[in-house]
Amino acid sequence: MPIGLKDIPAVGFAERETSDMLNQINQLSLSWGGLARVPGSQYFKNEMVRDGFYTMVATRDTTDRPAPQPIGQVEADQPDVPAFESPAPSDLSAVSSRHQYTLLKDGWIQAAQVWVPATGSNITYRFILGSLVPGATIPNIQTIDNPVLVAGQWNTLFVSNIAFVTGTIVSITIEAINSSGDTTWNHPWDFEGIQNNAGPPVGDWNRNNQHLIIRINDTDSDTTDQSVDLNLIIVGSLIRLASTAAPAVFFEYIITDVTDVGGYFEFGTILQQISAGGPTPGTPCTITPLIPTPQATQYETVLDWWIANQPTFATVIGSFEFAGLPVIGNGDNSFGIRVFFQEGEVSEDWDLVAFSGGNDNVGTSAQRLFLNQNIANNFFLGDFTIPVDFFITNTTFLITDERIHAGAIINLFPLNAEARAEDNRIMVSAVNFGSFEVEKDPPPAHDEMIFKYVIISR
């Protein structure tokens, strides 16, 4: 089953079945062992060491080397100059192409690259990076929006050295849309409030708690059937749901999925902005979408590539969508996606805490994809929830934990959509014996935020 936008979890990637593991780890303390010692040295359970770019912690007493070690040469799954179809095919819709890799070897994806047929001010690209480790049920998803690209050549999305075990599923998706302009409309609906499952009544709209779904009834609050206009909204549209009386109070989303449920439309969304806390339940609202006008969107493909060119490190399946609808018969086709895989020896006696190497030219998102996937399964030592709008009347939020000592390093990892949206404004402001504090930069209004944290002793 491909990993794509529809698989973005309603609650963050770390909400896996880790409670038993966390209960065990919560009884333990990590000890700082400094730099890795000579091969064959003895390490003890919960000892944390630095080995090259890797910070690792022992899961049991061991003499294994901490950091993963390469085996053989790096392998690429695509040539330097692929035999893409010429001219590049196209469609008058948003186009999604994907490679899904099921790893057959331990090792790491050293780099990922994409090849696009065209760039320009009207062309928008989004890259979706997904990973699902064996035993996990919720994939970890990260997105990269509109990086600088050059058409007709390989462009590096990220460089990384975070190890994966055999059986891990990794997917890379290209979403592209070419639009020459935008169309818009505005109609009235009342905000019903938060509904995680139910559709809205006539005249209303609602959203789920994580801002990943909004639902709009076919009939607006003036009793006018707006299903024709709602059907115009496509993936990639920007939609604003604002208080009619106070237009500066609004939610704003990017549309990632569109479903006509019958009686109402359900839209998959990525939250872009909350202004002045957003409308409250019962508020009459004006809904205004900005809908891109599709032009021919080109994409790259090599027909039947995977039939005779499967790499040794993974089983690869291609998949393809027009306007969010799967196009069957593309499993053997490759698209403009290439990865470099390094087979490696990965000791089961060590787990990753942090990786500080690599040259991630799109910021930290790609490295966090891999770093957080490992930590989510192994090292989260605690969690906390910041209530809705807590920072309107407070400047800091206190977390008590008797295992914390002055000088400890605290790493925060967001779990829900609001925490991810505000992550760059939430920071650890003080670490004391038995507690630490976090603070948030303005704007102060926010939904409930859920974080987990790692305590790193030294």
Image (tube, rainbow, N blue to C red):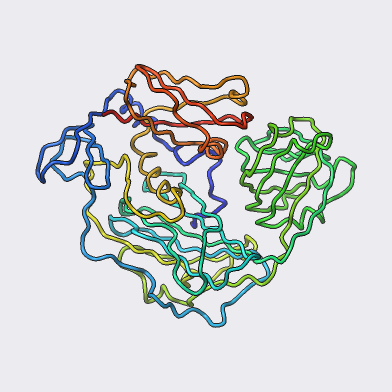
Quadrant that contains the C terminus? top left
The x, y position of residue 114, in whole percent, is: 47, 66
Classify 200 as above or below 445. below
399 versus 445 height, above or below: above
Q: Residue at x 58, y 69 (%)?
A: 119
x%, y% of residue 448? 58, 29
Query: Would residue 325 be found to the left or right of residue 9 on screen?
Result: right
Instruction: Note whether residue 164 is visible.
Output: no
Q: Position of residue 189 (x, y in %)?
A: 82, 40
Q: Nearer the viewer, residue 388 or 308?
A: 388
Q: Is residue 51 above or below residue 96?
A: above
Which residue occupies the foreground of this view, 16 or 67?
67
Residue 86, given in percent of the width and then of the height, sits at: 54, 82
Q: Is residue 162 visible?
A: yes
Q: Residue at x 65, y 41 (%)?
A: 273
Q: Is residue 227 left or right of residue 4?
A: right
- Residue drawn at the location 47% of the way across and 19% of the way down: 398
